[in-house]
Image (cartoon, rainbow, N blue to C red):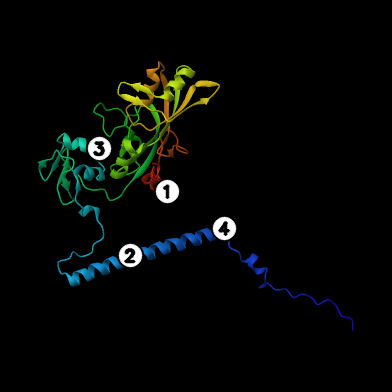
Amino acid sequence: MKKGIPKKKSNPSGSFSKFHTKKSNAAIKEQFKQEKRQWKKEREDFFDERRKSAAQNATTTNPKAPKYEPRNINQELMPLNKFIAHSGVAARREAAEMVKQGLVKVNGNVITEPGHKVSSKDDIRVKGKKISIQKDLVYILLNKPKDYITTTDDPQGRKTVLDLIRNATSDRVYPIGRLDRNTSGVLLFTNDGELAQKLTHPRNEIKKVYQATLNKPLEKNDFDAILKGLILEDGPAPVDVLAYSDLKDKTQVGIEIHSGRNRIVRRIFEHLGYDVKNLDRVTFAGLTKKNVDRGKWRFLTEKEVRDLKYFGKGKR
């Protein structure tokens, strides 16, 4: 009998089966995310139980020891201006000025010291209106158009930036920093007092990028003078980056600064005899107006909020 080559049996569960059952990259990523969330939750539960156990042991050995309670910002003593910032009335530095001006009462008494310690148990009123700490933090990015002023209220009845985000939230939010009436672009709103303090404090050197249109081409010697650093009436005006947006049209200039002084970009060019016809802030603290039409707004993503809170850490 002639011997033939034995026929190889199919083996769907053999070495090639792994290619048929291989998960997609998206499925693997989603599984990893779920495992990571579960691990974080288990870790938090573990340490929470340890803290509770330690507190119970301390109470057993020392009846006067305080019982364990989760951290609650409403129960904490904090400076008055910080409390006002957390209430969404104003940023922390602005709140300090309100206190100094005698606009704030604590339990019926006018307090003029921003560092005065208070808690949510106190009756705190700003301009006669009772305030409390915001529970929900809100972050809104607006692509500001011209002819709107950056303020929460205008006695002259002019249009304010709050008119543009009126339907965004019922919480009280306020703008971080300012854009003058004729400047457009990225403007951030929040009721997060700590973040507002961080983004407006000079030591953090928050970067802003502007697109400027001048009334005439920017000359090379003036270009170099701006980069070297001009001295304005209120002190030096450092510029981090300066560039022509279009080499064929030298009236179009991009400028990056970290100063938050009033009208600083306009004053830099005006100092050298240029008029700024249009000024648009295209970037603020890493945020851009991409996909946000002029006069429109959107909420920040969780990642953007997280990035803002850690913005600039480790740069120095």
Judge whether residue 145 can be spotted in this image.
no
Give the percent coordinates (x, y) of residue 57.
23, 71
Which residue sits furthest bottom?
1
Which label is found at residue 303?
1
Badge 3: residue crowd in 10 Å (few <14, some 14–19, many ≥20): some
- Looking at the image, is mark 4 or mark 3 earlier in the sequence? 4
Residue found 23% across the figure and 48% down from its top: 133
Circle 4: element type: helix
Residue 93, numbered label: 3
- Packing grade of label 1 (10 A; few <14, some 14-19, many >=20) is few
Name the amino acid type tagged 1.
Lys
Q: Secondary structure at mark 1?
A: helix
Query: Callout 2, which amino acid?
Result: Phe
Secondary structure under tag 3 reads helix
Q: Name above or below for residue 204 compared with residue 232.
A: below
Q: Give how far across and how far down residue 213 sits, in percent.
A: 45, 23
User: Are discs 4 and 3 less than 8 Å apart at CB?
Assistant: no
Query: What whole-number distance in Å separates the C-alpha atoms at marks 1 and 4?
Result: 22 Å
Residue projecting furthest to the right: 1
- Look at label 3 and name its amino acid: Arg
